Amino acid sequence: MTLLIDGKKISAAVVEQLAIDTKAFIAEFGVTPGLAVVLVGDDPASQVYVRNKVKQATAAGFHSTEHRLPADTGQAELNALVEQLNNDPSVHGILVQLPLPEQLNEPEIIRLIAAEKDVDGFHPLNVGALASGIAELIPCTPMGCMIMLEKTLGDLSGKHAVVVGRSNIVGKPMAALLLQANCTVTVVHSRSADIEAICRQADILVAAVGRPEMIRGSWIKPGATVIDVGINAVEKDGKRRLVGDVAFSEASEVAGAISPVPGGVGPMTIACLMKNTLTAARQQISA
Ligand code: NAP
């Protein structure tokens, strides 16, 4: 029987613990952790993500603010808002929803967010800390994947982990975390040769490609643990559905454990954003 790695259930436990930790934090320091979420433009998917993040932050007991700017916002205006949030002591975490409209310079904004408030973990200082194994603020999606893997497998030492995708948001930080957990890590990408054969060697397979159901059942080693990060909207039988990067029904027949889409990595990402916000508040209070 293949085990379903239930992101909804695991994330609910993370959020429950977080609410307890937040209460204790507020009681100890008399400070409520604050999260500011910035959304530029009206991309429908981003609007849903931002709404969920603000809702979850409030549920965790945080002070949360939402800053919406029009799609034609200029760099100077966005920079000014980030500077204002950097200087606001009631804000411990800043999240600028990506992608930004194309007139805006994403790397500039990521660098401008104060590293200690960078709850996405994308600032170069936090990326460097992750590569050195000393990071406190870790990108949320890979952190969520690690919690799912450790919950499913316990100690990951010695396992061969294959990460498909090398983005700054998912693939690269995922590989760093797996390495830190003593896995033997292989990263494959669009220029890799014979991806199928490499995937078939994986004890742990993490798919973060953005290609609907690219990874077939035949690519999976029997008994492997599969984490599907992909979220792809497709039309099936005239209806819009979300599918992952893994062909779920085929893969479920081979894998030992697999995360579904939806209901897998998605809810973990938001739960980890909340974890990072509390971590950021704790660091800033004790700085
Ligand atoms: P991305 O920035 O587009 O990166 C995709 C990666 O996949 C790139 O490294 C690319 O290689 C590689 N790739 C593309 N086609 C490939 C192929 N045919 N064979 C092998 N590798 C290939 O995407 P991302 O931001 O990492 O996101 C990946 C997926 O995860 C998307 O579906 C996204 O929606 C989803 N996602 C989900 C969550 C969540 O909370 N669940 C969070 C973030 C992202 P190159 O580098 O060579 O171009």
Image (cartoon, rainbow, N blue to C red):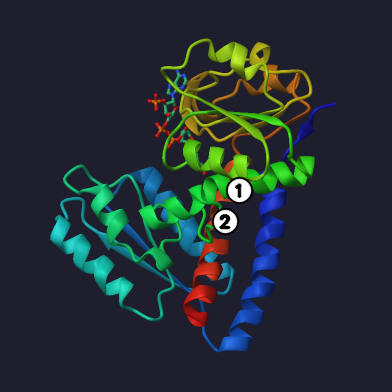
Residue that numbered label 2 is attached to: 272
Q: Residue at x 16, y 45 (%)?
A: 103
Q: Residue at x 77, y 44 (%)?
A: 155
Rendered position, 215 above or below 133: above
Q: Residue at x 47, y 25 (%)?
A: 234
Q: State which image quarter holds ligand 1.
A: top left
On the picture, is 276 further left or further right than 252? Answer: left
Q: Which mark is residue 144?
A: 1
Which percent across, then down, holds residue 76? 14, 61
Please tell me whether mark 2 sits on a helix, a strand or a loop: helix
- Distance between the Cα atoms at labels 1 and 2? 6 Å
Q: Check contact, mark 1 vs mark 2: CB within 8 A.
A: yes
In the picture, the quarter occupied by the N terminus is: top right
Please tell me whether mark 1 sits on a helix, a strand or a loop: helix
**How busy is the neighbourhood of tag 1: few (under 14 within 10 Å), some, or many (20 plus)?**
many
Foreground residue among 128 and 80 = 128
- Say if residue 210 shows up in the picture: yes
On the picture, is 67 further left or further right than 151? Answer: left
**How busy is the neighbourhood of tag 2: few (under 14 within 10 Å), some, or many (20 plus)?**
many
For this orientation, the residue located farthest to the front is 132
Labels in figure, total: 2
Q: Which mark is residue 53?
A: none
Which percent across, then down, holds residue 98? 35, 48
N-terminal label among 1 and 2 = 1
Is label 1 within 8 A of ligand 1 (CB to nearest ligand atom)?
A: yes
Q: Quadrant of residue 126?
A: bottom left
* Three-letter code, disc 1: Gly
Rendered position, 234 above or below 143: above
Foreground residue among 111 and 97 = 111
Is label 2 within 8 A of ligand 1 (CB to nearest ligand atom)?
A: no
